[in-house]
Amino acid sequence: MKDETTENSVIILHGMGWSVHRISRELNISRKRIRRLLVSNSVLRDTTPENEITPKKKRPSKLDPYKEFIGELLGKYSNITGQRVYEHLKVERPFWYFEQSFLNGREFKDRDDLKDQLRQWLRRVNDVHKHGTTKKRPIDMYIEEHPFLQVLPANHFDTSLVTHKVVNQESCIYREGYQYVVPEKYMYELCPIRITEDHVVIYSPTGEQIVTYPLAEKGRKERYVGVHQKRPQEA
């Protein structure tokens, strides 16, 4: 079974245009053996009477659009498993297409230029390119699916980090080297804090919002964010 698998791999890769030297390197077998397999296969094919061969009807395969990509995987990873090939085709193949068709050979001045070129590529290339598996254009499939699409949420999904911190003896919540000032009445209390992309929001133990501060920028010399309120003088 191992010899048959090796022979099939040699014949397939050679048929794809691979050199004997490359096949030898990738499959880790001698060039002499490869030439022997190729010659043997050629002799067998040329000397077998056609009337003894039952022609097989070629059936279309789901893998037909991906044969070139699978060949590249076999060349790069000779012992790759079928499961990994499958994972490359449901996950990595679309990114490979995007890289080859859009990113390859392009230059971008800035982010806005990248977005402009991407919109043009989507409209002129990707949306009208017939998909190898579905045999349909993405724009046509979108038109079919559009009536069934759900409305996007009215509010953005909150990806803030929520955690709890104890207000220290300086009436501050310490985070990443900076002290965020909290009213003194919350000293030593465990308070929830919500950290967004650019702000820190501090809540009381019962959930009421106390203060909101911009996140301290890196390299800032002043370690306190906010101002301590002075206690009223006793009469």
Image: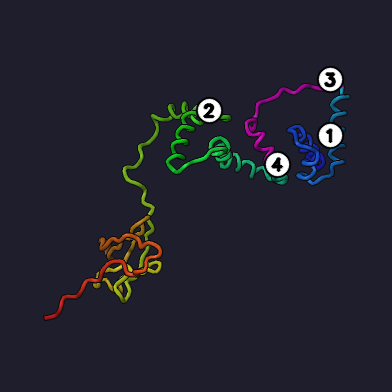
Quadrant location of the N terminus in the rendered image: top right
Residue at 78% across, 34% down: 11
Look at mark 2 in the image and give the residue it sits on.
129
Q: What amino acid type should be assigned to the residue bearing mark 4?
A: Leu
Q: Secondary structure at mark 1?
A: helix
- Can you tell which mark lies on residue 50? 3
- x and y, in percent, of residue 87 in the image: 60, 43
Quadrant location of the C terminus in the rendered image: bottom left
C-alpha distance separating marks 4 and 3: 32 Å
Instruction: Please identify, in this view, whether the residue under mark 1 or under mark 3 is nearer the observer.
Output: 1
C-alpha distance separating marks 1 and 3: 20 Å
> Nearer the N terminus, badge 4 or badge 1?
1
Determine which quarter of the picture holds residue 116. Answer: top left
Look at mark 1 in the image and give the residue it sits on.
38
C-alpha distance separating marks 4 and 1: 19 Å
C-alpha distance separating marks 2 and 4: 27 Å
Q: Residues within 10 Å of mark 1 (few under 14, many from 20)?
A: some
